[in-house]
Each structure stands twice: as C-alpha cells, then as structure tokens.
Image (cartoon, grey):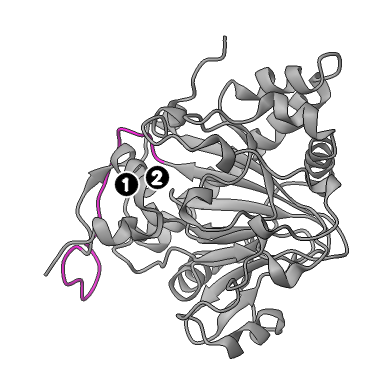
Amino acid sequence: MVKMPILSEAYKDHPVKQNLIVPLDFSSVKDVPESHAWAQCYDDPKINPNDIEKSWSSISVPVIDLDDPNVVNLIFKACETWGMFQVTNHGISKEVLDQVEFRAKSLFNLPFEQKMKVVRPPDGATGYGYPRITPFFNKLMWNEGFTIMGDSLNHDAKVLWPNDFQDFCEVISEYQTKMKDLGNKLMGLLLKSLNIPKPILEGKDQDLCTALQLNSYPTCPDPTQTMGLAQHTDTFLFTILHQSGNTSGLQVLKDGLGWVSVDPHPGALVVNVGDLLHLISNARFPSAIHRAVVNNEKQRLSIAYFIGPPLDFEVSPFLDYPNCEGPCFRSLKVKEYVSIKSKYLDLALSIVKKSG
C-alpha cells in the first residue's frame, strides 16, 4: 500500500471529475477534436492581439550565472521585473538532464492502455493525467502529465514496468536529489535578495512540500487551434523547470509586452516565482503568469520541480524594507492557501489580499 504523500492530503477535499483527468490518446488522432479546440485561446480580451507576435521576439527573461558575484542583485531584479529567469552553472550536468528527459519520453511513449494503469485518482495528486487546473477551463489541453510525490515513484514505476522499473526510479531519484540541493541554494539566494535575515524554513527541510511533474506536449496537427497548458501561476514558492532540446513552447506574460517566449538556453534551467513567494515578498516579486503552446513538428517535454514550505507553516508578508506601506496579504497556513487555490485558481491571491 502506498504511503500518502503529505502534499496529496491538501488536494483530497477538491476531487476532480474522471473525464477531466484522463488524457486524449494523442497517438490515435489526426485532427484537433472539438473538446480540445480553443477557438478563443489567442483572443483573451485582457491581451492585445498584437502582443501575440511578440511571443517569438528576441526579448526574453534574464539568464543568470549562479557563479556571478552579483548574483543576488541579478536575481532580485529578474524576480521584480519578470517573476522568472534562467540559471546557468547550476551544478546539474547535461548527462543528468538528458537521462531524466530520456526516461520521461520513455514513459509518455508507452501504450495508452499501459499509462492508464497509473491514472491519477479523482481525489489524488500523483500519477498520469491532465493538469489539475483542467476543471477551470472550458476546453481540454494538448498535454499529458505524470506527477511524482513521496512513495508514488516506486509504486507507479512497478506498475508501468513490472520487470524493469529500477532504472527509471534511479534516474528520477537522482534528479530529485539534485533538484532539492539546487532548490536549497536558490531558496537562500531568493531570501537574501529580499533581505530576509534567516531561512524561513530552518530545521523543517524534511517536511518541505515538493513535487516532480513530467509533462509531454505531443505534436499537434493544428497548433493554432489548441493550447498545451493554459495560463496560470504556480502555487508554491518557486519552480525549477527543465525544457527539452531546442523546442520552444513556454511563454510568460509580461506587462507591456504580452506573451514572451522563454526559449531553451543551452544548459540552463528556468526558475519562476510562485504565489507563496509573491505573498512573502509582499507583492514585490510577481507570481509569473505562464502557459505552454504546442507545435506540429515534434514532441516537447518539460520537467518541473515545485518547492514549497511545509503544509502547517504559516506564510506572512515580509515587511522590513524601505517604503513598506504595510502588508498586502493576510497571513495563513500553506495548507489553507493550497485549498483556496484548488478551489478558485487565479482568484486565490485576491482572496487572501488585505482590503484597504
């Protein structure tokens, strides 16, 4: 019996209907079905249609060398202006990144019936399925994902590869260990950039909320008619993302520019600010609104590592900085915010915003 990961408990009160979990068998379709046809996906009334052209411009998020002596200031500026940046010299080898990408591809290339053996349960958080944000949109996304938390790795891998699961588990476990180390380093740099005097999670490392999300965006017969991953912000402190090869797809929404493409930079990993870091920074760091588009040439993969405080940790805006005019948000426990986000998605931050 699988031990329930701590984070999974936060989602149990907000089950998802089965038809919004099970992905399309993308290998069997030749046209975009009506269920996935986002006729208005590039016509958001809040977005200037002319901004779409800028998605593929040369403007993009900063690329920061973690060995740069000015790294703390560079991270602060990137978070303040973009809520997202890419990092190089992060200590994770190309071999490790290639291995995890290879294993992710081997999973998504399994027969559909085999992947369905580990489909995510309605009240669960791990396994195979559509993104958890799916119920908030009228159309389905051109995406299939696989979520790993706690003991779910060994359990699901044994189901998918009964006689050959060890290699997958070893590669994923090594990647999680390296992501944890990098996450701790980035946590220190982010908090230092905000002049927070000591680690807010000191002594609670073993209870950190972490999750690994493998994403596949299959080739699409008509990329203009569908969406790989709808626009959203991430719930926790920050996310570390690996993108496959030279395939673009990730976009971030930037004030004054619209959707900007975050193209893979050689050897770099993407870091984006989540809601809880936005809250702790007292709205100085925007929670990055991002999405993923698809293409008709090749499958795109991404591997996201989410990092958040323990569920019982109380997050509060940090107010000790020049010209602070008071808290923008009320204090609350992580589990409460996860519950609010699960129920209201993009309205969650406004719900915890302090009035007046």
- In the rendering, at what x and y percent does residue 318 appear? 26, 57
Magenta segment range?
309-327
Can residue 171 be seen by looking at this rendering?
yes
Q: Residue at x 61, y 54 (%)?
A: 140
Check the image and name the residue furthest to the front.
Answer: 34
Q: From the viewer's side, name the closer residue of 119 and 318.
A: 119
Determine which quarter of the picture holds residue 194.
Answer: bottom left
- In the rendering, at what x and y percent does residue 148 appear? 61, 32
The amino acid beneath tag 2 is Ser
Residue where numbered disc 1 is placed: 340
Do the numbered discs 2 and 1 sit on residues whose CB atoms are within 8 Å? yes
Name the chief secondary structure element in magenta: loop
Determine which quarter of the picture holds residue 102.
Answer: top right
Direction from residue 36 to residue 222 in the image, left or right: right
Q: Residue at x 49, y 49 (%)?
A: 135
- On residue 342, which mark appears? 2
Q: Residue at x 70, y 37 (%)?
A: 175
Circle 1 SS class: helix
Direction from residue 279 to residue 91 in the image, left or right: right
- In the rendering, at what x and y percent does residue 160 appear? 77, 23
Residue 136 vertical position relative to residue 256 in the rendered view, above or below: above
Q: Quadrant of the N terminus?
A: top right
Q: From the viewer's side, name the closer residue of 62 and 185.
A: 62
Circle 2 SS class: helix
The amino acid beneath tag 1 is Ile
Label 1 environment density (alpha carbons within 10 Å; few <14, some 14–19, many ≥20) = some
Q: Residue at x 33, y 37 (%)?
A: 335
Direction from residue 10 to residue 253 in the image, left or right: right
Direction from residue 217 to residue 255 in the image, left or right: left
